[in-house]
Amino acid sequence: MIDFPNSEKICRIEDPVNWEMEKMDSFVQACREMALFHKKSCPEINFVYKRHDFDPECIVAEGDIELIPPIGVTAMKYHLLLSRPPGEAALKLTSSGTKGQKTQIWFDEKSLERVQAMLGGLWKQEGLVSDKKTNYMMMVYDPEEAKDLGIAFSIRNQQRFAPEAQTYFSIRKDLNGNWEFNSKKAISKLEEFISEKKPVRIHGITSFIYELIEELLKVGGVKLPPNSFLLTGGGWKAADDKKTSREYFRERAEMAFGIPSENIRDGYGMAEHSAPYIECKRHRFHVPVYNRVVVRDPESMVMLPPGKIGLLELVTPFNAMMPNLAVLSTDLGYIDPEVCPCGWNSPTFTIVGRGGISKHKGCALTASEIVRRKQ
């Protein structure tokens, strides 16, 4: 017997950025299914639901999704909320944050399988799955030294979509035990990859990749082999003084790596939510049918219409281990009013920036320290 049949169904959709009524109905049922489970299994969520006079049985249509009381990402940094016994956790990840606080993200075995299926379906539909042996330049922390850090795990996990030839992790610990990014060593390894004429995939944190781009452009750039990709994520961290527009970043990346714009994609996500988002060929973030993005007024918490900027609330019904069904982020953005010209019919959203007086940095703390040391 399947514990969460509706969640299993929606998370394993093969073309998640094409919305259809049957898929949307499965999502609604999965949210009701998961909300009922968390209400019964997590005392804290039961308290929150009662305080908001929310009954999960009311989730019967698409418009009811916004009624689910969200959990704030900042609260998740201070409180570990579980709906299953700790012994059922198959994977535990952490994301470093401000003042030493860490968000813990736990998955039971079936929930982990569901989120892996979600990622696989999205990458396949976006044309990012390949059977060609590929060299990887990973602009993230070496997972051998950061085994439980969420961003290192998530980007390493993306290597399953093209078979690995070689992998180089460019952020390593120096002799003093501090994380270090050495652009010269990264360029040397990249040149070795190019000489092998296999596709190259560059994954990682935008700020470090931009530093690599600027170093490459000083020597005229390189030409990556055909079917190579640049896949960014993690934002600019503490390098706000170096931050550029996404359009300018792509222009520089095209010149530095010699690849077309459609092979340069940005990813969005957070450990607390765990569900994936990635830019389409037209560089817009689509909402896969197993997710919803709700934009709320920061003061009234009222749901805002397309085009209006507010706090992003992210909803996904895959995780039975933790009650992160609906998570209120500190990111500001809006639902795009126009349909994306790429051909997929799902809604798209634009990220404007971080909200609040101080940034909720998630995995950014360690990266920001590296950036500051290099200034």
Image (cartoon, helix red, strand yellow):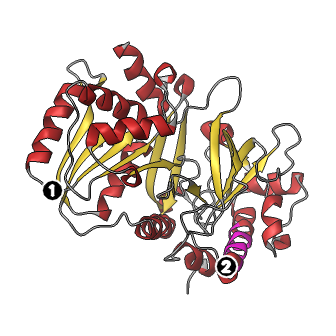
Please name the predominant secondary structure of the magenta segment in the image.
helix
Residue 145 at least partly seen: no
Q: Mark 2 highlights which residue?
A: 26
Choose top left, top right, bottom left or bottom right for residue 170.
top left
The circle on residue 116 is none
Rendered location of residue 180, percent (x, y): 29, 24
The residue at the point 79 percent across, 45 percent down is 308
Rendered location of residue 318, percent (x, y): 58, 66
The residue at the point 42 percent across, 68 percent down is 120
Q: Mark 1 highlights which residue?
A: 198
- Quarter of the picture holding the C terminus: top left
Is 23 covered by the magenta stretch?
Answer: no
Q: Is 211 drawn above or below residue 107 in the view shown?
A: above
Rendered location of residue 150, percent (x, y): 44, 45
Relative side of 116 to 272, left or right: left
Q: Amino acid at mark 1?
A: Lys
